[in-house]
Amino acid sequence: METNAAANIEAPTAGALERRIDLSVAIAELDQDVDQRLRRLGKNMKLPGFRPGKVPASIVRQQYGEQARLDALQEALGRLFGEAVTAQQLRVAGTPKIESKSSNDTHIEFSATFEVYPDITLNDLAEVEVERPVLEVGSAEVDSTLDILRRQRVRYEPVDRPAALADRVSIDFLGKKDGEPFAGGQGKDYRFVLGEGKMLSDFESAVIGTRPGETKSFDMTFPAEYFSKDLAGQSVTFEVSVKEVGEPILPELDADFAKALGVEDGDLAKMRAEVEANLRREVKKRLQGKITGQVMDALLQANPIEVPGVLIQREIERLMQVARQDMEQRGMKVKDLPMQPEWFADQARRRVSIGLILSEIVKRNDLQARPAQVKELVQDAAQSYDQPEEVVRWYYAKPERLADLEGAAIEANVVSWVLEQVKVLDKPVAFAELMGQQS
């Protein structure tokens, strides 16, 4: 089919990465292609009263003519667009928006608007400073982890004394605003641990010191930034009836505790060794995550780039879908929680920018994932399971299961490469800070 495009590709003012191509399709050649398509359809068309392949051309055209013309035009525009961008060596981001411009007796004119990937110039990193967090796992870190594991298995014994921090209380409460109960301001047999931050600090402070069977009324003002606009900055009155105060009882570090952690023979030395091994893996993972974040920040700052809007929009949609799935897994009703694309815009822009920069670094420095790297990551991931060899076989049963680990290997390669280019400053990090533990 005779088709042509304007020799120049314009850059509209809407964005630095936006381009426009003018396309022209000859009507005579388009009609010829449509006729060929209809003849092919007619050879296989079945219609009551006619032998197969003998349906009159007029009937074939009546039923399939519009679709055949649409398909022919779409194919012509797609081929023409591909030839034009290839000739100009453009890397198209997303799908072009094709609009009809005009037509005459011989041609139909179209314009295709699209975005291109940016040309990335990687800047020198020699003067860039990156802080590398460091932490050695020792006895203190293992002890801290065991303490956390004990607290995760805490039980509560009812006591007849004033409630204190770390106690679990069971209460009935009723909140009133201007003398009237307000939505969400009441509960029955509600349990929470004082000091965990599940309730507002002023509410917890009022409960501390109360005894089982005691009823207390107190005024409280909601924070100005409280999520409920109806209550933000508002003063209310709560009436609280304390039904139970539970004192935390931590399990002893004994054989029963070791068995609860999966050490069948209850050997404490073995338990400690397993905790230490798991902790070392977790610390390594978190340290790598922190240095990776530092490296990505450095790359973004050193290499500011324009990002195709279509890629940002695509990433926003992906992040929204992930958020929806996460909320559903937590038992939330997604349809009752409105979600705005702008909430994810900054994160999407960052992720797309990093992806483009990393892709360029990988291409220029041959930093693709090596099979040995992926194998090491598979084996490391399998260690947290009871039968690691089965996990390894599962990963390698289907190549697509390795995709995430291959991506992690590539990211690690880029981080290692960047650290060789920049000034690295080792900075000790506190164990509690690294593990995100509350003080």
Image (cartoon, grey):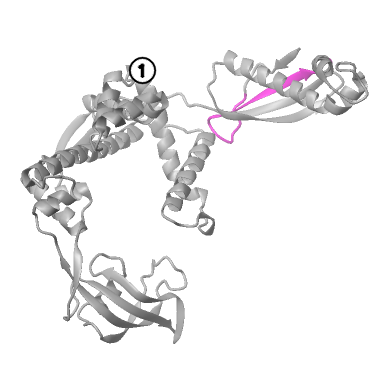
Q: Kindly indicate the quadrant of the structure image that contains residue 15.
A: top right
Q: Which amino acid does label 1 sit on?
A: Arg
Q: Kindly indicate the quadrant of the structure image that contains residue 53.
A: top right
On the picture, is 366 further left or further right than 41?
A: left
Pick the front one: 227 or 394: 394
Q: Looking at the picture, how far across and down is residue 304, in whole percent?
A: 39, 33
Q: Looking at the picture, how far across and down is residue 409, in whole percent?
A: 30, 27
Pick the front one: 380 or 263: 263
The residue under label 1 is: 364
- Magenta region: 10-28
Residue 180 visible in image: yes
Q: Residues within 10 Å of mark 1 (few under 14, many from 20)?
A: few
On the picture, is 57 further left or further right than 360?
A: right
Residue 415 visible in image: no
Q: Kindly indicate the quadrant of the structure image that contains residue 246.
A: bottom left
> Is residue 25 within the magenta segment?
yes
Marker count (numbered) = 1
Q: Image point 17% across, 67% down: which residue?
A: 248
Q: Looking at the picture, how far across and down is residue 312, in whole percent?
A: 49, 38
On the picture, is 23 further left or further right than 384?
A: right
Image vertical order of residue 401 relative to residue 337, above or below: above
> Is residue 150 within the magenta segment?
no
Image vertical order of residue 394 relative to residue 6, above or below: below
Image vertical order of residue 61 relative to residue 160, above or below: above
